[in-house]
Image (cartoon, grey):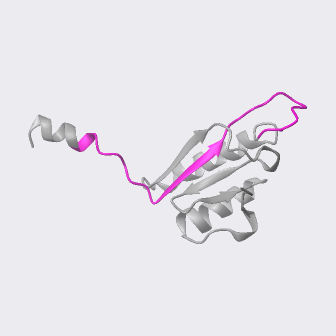
Amino acid sequence: MSEAAESEVLDIPQVYTHHVFCCFTQRPPQHPRGSCGANGAQPLWDRLGRKLEASGRRDIAMTSSGCLSFCQAGPIMVVYPQGIWYTPKTPEDIDEIVESHLLGGKPVERLIIVPRI
């Protein structure tokens, strides 16, 4: 393979079966909108990252995001390409989302929220 062809291969974006966006917004205490950070998101996202890394699955990505606009319901995460919004509250919720949805293909109905538009 030529150097130019190899460069082109490296520039092709990874295609994921699941791409998880997690809100890392941290507003000050008592902020009227609240925030995912204030609602305990960080330890949950840390756990999610560890679980995904341990799975060895390179077709599942996790990306930190800013505000996803449903602050008082947080912590909030959204899984694409399905567009499924979750509100995990415990480490066990994260485990269930990873095992059932991200690895098993079955969304966790009890944790899904449907944002009002």
The extreme left residue here reads 2
From the viewer's perspective, is residue 113 above or below residue 38? below
Where the N terminus falls, by quadrant?
Answer: top left
Give the residue displayed 72% in from the left and 57% down from the top. Answer: 115
Give the residue displayed 74% in from the left and 53% down from the top. Answer: 91
Callout count: 0
Residue 98 left/right relative to 111: left
x then y, percent, for residue 72 = 82, 46
Q: Residue 108's quadrant in the figure?
A: bottom right
The extreme right residue here reads 30
Q: Residue 10's quadrant in the figure?
A: top left
What is the magenta segment's predominant secondary structure? loop
Q: Nearer the viewer, residue 111 or 70?
A: 70
Quick check: is 108 in the magenta stretch?
A: no
Give the residue displayed 83% in from the left and 38% down from the top. Answer: 33
Which region is colored magenta?
9-35
Quick check: is 16 in the magenta stretch?
A: yes
From the viewer's perspective, is residue 54 above or below residue 102? above
